[in-house]
Amino acid sequence: MSIIRGRFSKEADKKVIQYSESLSYDSRLYPYDIKGSLAHVKMLAKQNIIPKEDADKITKGLIEIKDELDNGVFVFNEELEDIHISIESRLKELIGDSAGRLHTARSRNDQIALDMRLYVRDKTKDAIQAITDLEKVIVEQAEKNKETIMPGYTHTQLAQPILLAHHLLAYFEMFERDKARFADSYKRTDVMPLGSAALSGSPYNVDREFVAKELGFESVTQNSMDAVSDRDFVIEYLSNAAITMMHLSRMAEEIVLWSTSEFGFMTLDDAYTTGSSIMPQKKNSDVAELGRGKTGRVYGNLQRMLVTMKGLPLSYNRDLQEDKEGLFDTVDTLLLSLEVFTGMLETAEYNTENMARSLKNDIILATDIADYLVKKGLPFRDAHRIVGNIVNYATTNNMNLMDINLEKYKEFCELFEADVKDISVESSIKSKNVIGGTAPEQIEYQLKRARKLLD
Ligand code: ARG
């Protein structure tokens, strides 16, 4: 008979056991469960809630169980519901009746809340580290390409010239905000729920602050009913992960696009591409596509948790057990995606000649020509219309804007002078010397700032 079926006359139905078990996936929480139990038992002894000899036995037993689990020799009994019961049952086998004192002043409700907070806290740190690793590669590549000129796009149409470094550093900004979000939700995760017991608090003289300190928590929860039933720290992690994946997915889309022969801006390393089973010429950017695709399941996991929580009355309800698989899947997906993308980017090559080639079509300078007229005194709307006509003329005659001679320019507007011919991609880029602009001076400043933030 399971250790928690005191009032029952028989075991649960086989299908019910299968339906309600969480052991098959919550076993990954064992390091956190044992860590929490070790702190709890230390507190119980310190407060004279249980005899010191029992506490010592429990501590020794838990360390032994941790060892068994670390070394993969722990034998899981699939009939046992979850990781908490599994560990407690093993403890009983190892040390006998003293094991029964571990669960004093504790419920699985505050125990799982603690495990989840310990876990999410750890994984939040991992996410921040993994994003930082990716950012380092981005900044490194931006550093190498602070003079590389490429076309900038809006609506995936040629728009204005930019520096490749500027494009790359846009992602640095996104990932900085992602990190800030994780760092912020960490604060709300870093609160210790043990002592809430089943829902209303503990009748023993527990020292909650001591447990919090033992486990490195910043503070303790202030309402036991909230503490056992709140999972918004999980939702925040899932949401932060979803936003990070969205950024990664945007990058993925560009990697896919840039590695096509049509764009040819980027060549991925063979280690990060795959072949086709039928077309021998293929070198596919599957890794980027998978990152883009996996973003969908990370969004799904967020949605799933929001829906699970939305109708729950206070306090603990078993629905909450459904918080785990989606979270674990998101943690695994996010960390692996970040790691793989870091490697993919690190080994990728930028084909700067192809970027230069697509700038040959100097239609990309149209806005600069309009700005030129504005500087000569024309209202921008007039300049916009005039340059529109010039672009039309160039396109119809299959010409570049800079191939049109000065006389023709003057026909469109008498404000044009010889210096209109000085307009180039370089002059365009140089002119965007505003905070956040693409001018080399600004990029130099942004690179310095990025390096400082990464230190
Ligand atoms: N496996 C449960 C969960 O993940 C642990 C808490 C169970 N508590 C209970 N009263 N049945 O939420």
Image (cartoon, grey):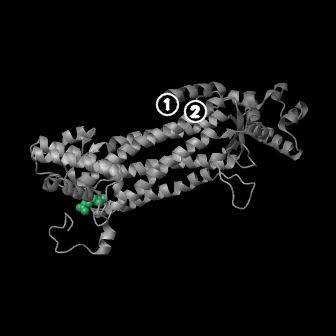
- 237 or 432: which is nearer to us? 237
Tell me the residue at 17%/72% (across/down).
8
Secondary element at tag 2:
helix
Q: Would residue 35 appear left or right of 422 to someone viewing this image?
A: left
Whether label 1 lies within 8 Å of ligand 1 gets the answer no
**Residue 137 occupies which quadrant of the picture?**
top right
- 274 or 326: which is nearer to us? 274
Residue 29, labelled with which disc?
Answer: none
- 376 or 147: which is nearer to us? 147
Classify 359 as above or below 327. Answer: above
Q: What residue type is labelled 2?
A: Val
Q: Which quadrant does the N terminus fall into?
A: bottom left
**N-terminal of the two: label 1 or label 2?**
2
Residue located beneath label 1 in the image = 454
Q: Are marks 1 and 2 in contact (CB under 8 Å)?
A: yes
Residue located beneath label 2 in the image = 139
Give percent across and percent down for residue 409.
86, 34
Give percent across and percent down for residue 216.
28, 38
Secondary element at tag 1:
helix
Tell me the residue at 74%/33% (across/down).
368
Tell which quarter ligand 1 is in: bottom left
Real-space CA distance between mark 1 and mark 2, rounded to the nearest whole angstrom = 9 Å
